[in-house]
Amino acid sequence: MFSNISKILSQSIDIQNIGILTLGVFATQAIAIISAPIIARIFSTENIGIFALLMALVGIFSTFSSLKYELAIVIEKDTKVANMLEILSYFILLTASLLISLIIGFLVELNISIGSIIIDESYYFIGLITLLIGVFTIQTNRLNREENYTLIAISNLINKIAVVSSQVIFGLLGMGAYGLIIGNIFGYLVSTLVNYFFGLKNSKILNNFILQNLFHTARIHKKFPRYTVGQSFFNTTSHQLPVILLGYYYGLDYVGYYWMAMRVIQIPTLLFGESIRKVFYRKISDSTEQLQEALAIYKKYIFVLSLIIFLPVIIIFFFNEYIFSFILGKDWLISAEFAKWLFIWIGVGFISQPASAVVLAFGINKFGFYYDLTLLFARMLVLVIGGLYFDILSTIIAYTIVGVIFNLALIYICYRFISKKS
């Protein structure tokens, strides 16, 4: 009886924690939705293109800035070892950020350009932003370990509010792309301070610190840099490739159009996609031994998600110009044309969330690694060929087709995998 009560209480706490995080996600995305029309009217496409390219590079650097040791903080059972992991993560992050800053500074001083991309003074900020995002990520993993989900949700919300409000203020002051960049820095600085003063100030991770233990901890958890960094790098680079290569071949204005199109059409998947994946992952993980049940759950989720996303895809495809001109203004009709095609890929990606969860739940990580690697090269190939020989819309359409084919293949392969096992 008491064990049943304990189980029920534990489940209710899990539901409460998920609810807190989900509410935080909804709030931050609501701010993103509200801010999009304002940002679009204050900043030029070139301003947004510069910011998008800079953040794409930051995203790639962030995949290895702490060698993913921060992920081990959550699962490590020994508190002292978790403290060492946190120190190790900060040490690697600081070293990587300094090296990135030195390399970028050297390239800026050379005053070189790569295709249509000019490496100017704005790139000096890459090292600092990588550092702040890394600190915020490490803090979040520490708070996750301590199950302080309320502070995680609050700090994410404060981050979004601080970023957007400062970007709008700096934009109105005529700071251009620097307004977007410095606003982003301000947001992460504020949120890291909130995490520290309201959740981590008394953690005392330096107690009983021994340098030898730091290297020992790194060796114990070497699987994170060995396996996770590579897959994360391929996955992130694959998603950031359009920003970099469209900027290289077509110019920063078109990067701005692409970035804004993605910002608008990704809202539904950002709101629901991760939550759906987590819920399905939990269900499918519980059914790995009952394969007929797992297959039934998989088919059900694929069917329901297909029904959910079908109507939005149709609406965006046929009414994209009306929607974008209303939300962003008539200056962003090129974004509307991009969105018309890109949302087909986003929609199929939304449907494939259960397939991604199957890869994790059944431990077929080797397949997942090679899938991500193949997808990266396919995307790179289509963007390079498109940039060399075709106009940008044709390239966007080809990029969409590649994304759709790979997502559909992933859905089918995971279906066949469960079917054969059952």
Image (spheres, helix red, strand yellow):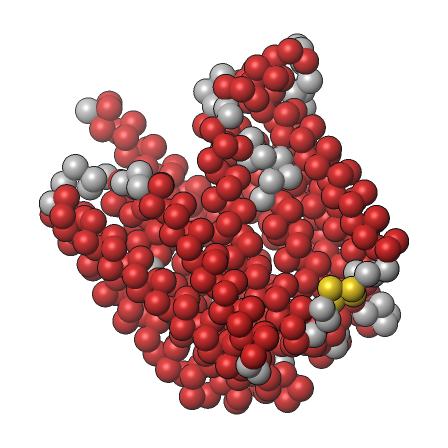
Q: Is residue 55 left or right of residue 102?
A: left
- Name the residue at 20% across, 59% down: 300
- Name the residue at 43% across, 52% down: 372
Residue 5 % position (x, y) = 26, 29
The answer to whether one can see residue 149 in this image is: no
Residue 365 % position (x, y) = 36, 41
As rendered, which of 386 and 328 lies closer to the eye? Answer: 386
Task: Judge whether 331 appears above or below 38 on screen.
Answer: below
As rendered, which of 122 and 193 lies closer to the eye? Answer: 122
Residue 110 % position (x, y) = 86, 55
- Name the residue at 57% across, 15% down: 216
Residue 133 % position (x, y) = 66, 45
Q: Quadrant of residue 47?
A: bottom right
- Name the residue at 58% across, 35% down: 67
Task: Judge whether 81 appears above or below 412 on screen.
Answer: above
Quadrant in the picture for the C terminus: top left
Q: Quadrant of residue 268?
A: bottom left
The answer to whether one can see residue 320 in this image is: yes
Quadrant in the picture for the N terminus: top left
Task: Judge whether 241 appears above or below 399 on screen.
Answer: above
Q: Is residue 321 left or right of residue 248?
A: left
As rendered, which of 319 and 120 lies closer to the eye? Answer: 120
Q: Is residue 394 left or right of residue 178?
A: left
Count of numbered circles on the image: 0
As rendered, which of 351 and 258 lies closer to the eye? Answer: 258
Q: Quadrant of residue 410?
A: bottom left
